[in-house]
Image (tube, helix red, strand yellow):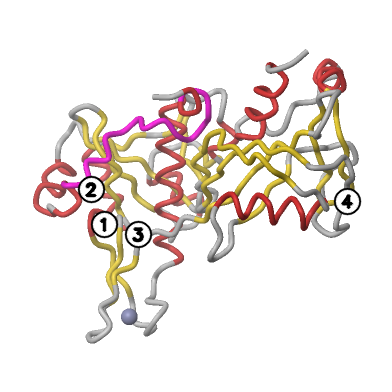
Amino acid sequence: MDTAERVLAYGGGWLDRAGPLRTDPTRLSALLAESSTVVLALWRDRCLVDAGGPVRLTAERASLVRSAAGETVFLGLDGDVAVFAVDLSALPERAAVEMAGAARSVDVRALVGRLDPGDAAVQAYARGLLHWHRQQGYCGACGAPAVADGGGHMRTCTGGECGRLLFPRIEPAIIVLVEAPGPPGRCLLARHAGAAEDAFSTLAGFVEVGESLEDAVRREMAEEAGVTVTDVTYQGSQAWPFPAGLMVGFRATATSDEIRVDGEELLEARWFTRAELRDRVASGRTLGRVDAIDHRLLEDWLAAGS
Ligand SMILES: [Zn+2]
């Protein structure tokens, strides 16, 4: 496990995803009936929790819940213990909470820091996978209903001749710490449309069709901030299933100090020295979102110089 996986929330490979089991429905049914099996319950992108954290349904309750609920997906193995998630989104919130024996529903991102990192990662994984099932009820090619298959890791179109296999979509985005070309060391941060008055963060954007990640970095920096960058270097990636992202972190160097914001996505951008960033931290501001890779990009950059 490398540094990025150790530090960043929502990833880390906590479960053995046990891919071969996905194509063995008999074995999956047997695992669902085992008393040691863990079944997590989610409601519309939210965890169902009690005072101890996300609820884990007993086999008996899980069987009851599953008869009234949406998809059940196989997430993997935690040691010898199978882990599944069930989607209660079709029910009103109160009914879902009661059926799961929970106290309330909460966004997993609100639990980060309090939740064990493995539990947070598994909840995010379940959230992303169940979200996709809710969005992919029908085949996008022929419009026929699509049904879950492969332990919940694919759907199959039921329109006879079509029969298309549908897989969960992941939408990659790049997130970039841009450094100024010469001394003193400075990084480029921007205030995004809709952000608070003094909320500066790193630049980011979605990868487009036909682009490499590095192409996307160069295009986004040019479009949003009028900055040409070189030395685009991969820093790490972060699972971001909210609902379907993958954040890919880079560092890059600008060829000039000049900035020209687009005025749409970015309202303002400017260069910050390490001393300025440290002052911001000292005055109580956080560097980016604490659960996100931009926080990590900024911390690494701060640690790399005085
Ligand atoms: Zn189809």
Query: Can residue 230 be found in the magenta stretch?
Result: no
4 or 1: mark nearer the eye: 4
Q: Taking the image as drawn, is residue 20 in sight?
A: yes
Residue 63: which numbered mark, if any?
2
The picture places residue 278, in percent across and down from the top left corner, at 81, 18
Quadrant housing the C terminus: top right
Crowding at mark 1 (Cα within 10 Å: few <14, some 14-19, many 20+): few
* Mark 1, residue position: 67
Along the line of sight, the residue nearer the viewer: 217 or 22: 217
The picture places residue 197, in percent across and down from the top left corner, at 90, 41
Quadrant housing the N terminus: top left
The span from disc 3 to disc 2 (Cα, nearest Å) is 12 Å
* Location of residue 223 by image quarter: bottom right
Q: Is residue 276 placed above or below 267 in the rendered structure? A: above
Q: Earlier in the sequence, mark 3 or mark 2?
A: 2
Is the residue at mark 3 in contact range of ligand 1, meaning its CB lies under 8 Å from it?
no
Crowding at mark 3 (Cα within 10 Å: few <14, some 14-19, many 20+): some
Name the element at disc 3: loop
Residue 70: which numbered mark, if any?
3
The span from disc 3 to disc 4 (Cα, nearest Å) is 42 Å
The span from disc 2 to disc 1 (Cα, nearest Å) is 6 Å
Numbered range of the magenta stretch: 6-20
**Which secondary structure dominates the residues rendered in magenta?**
loop
The span from disc 3 to disc 1 (Cα, nearest Å) is 8 Å
* Mark 4, residue position: 267
Q: Is residue 63 placed above or below 263 in the rendered structure? A: above
Contact flag, marks 3 and 2 (Cβ < 8 Å): no
Contact flag, marks 2 and 1 (Cβ < 8 Å): yes
Contact flag, marks 3 and 4 (Cβ < 8 Å): no
Q: Taking the image as drawn, is residue 193 in sight?
A: no
The span from disc 4 to disc 1 (Cα, nearest Å) is 50 Å
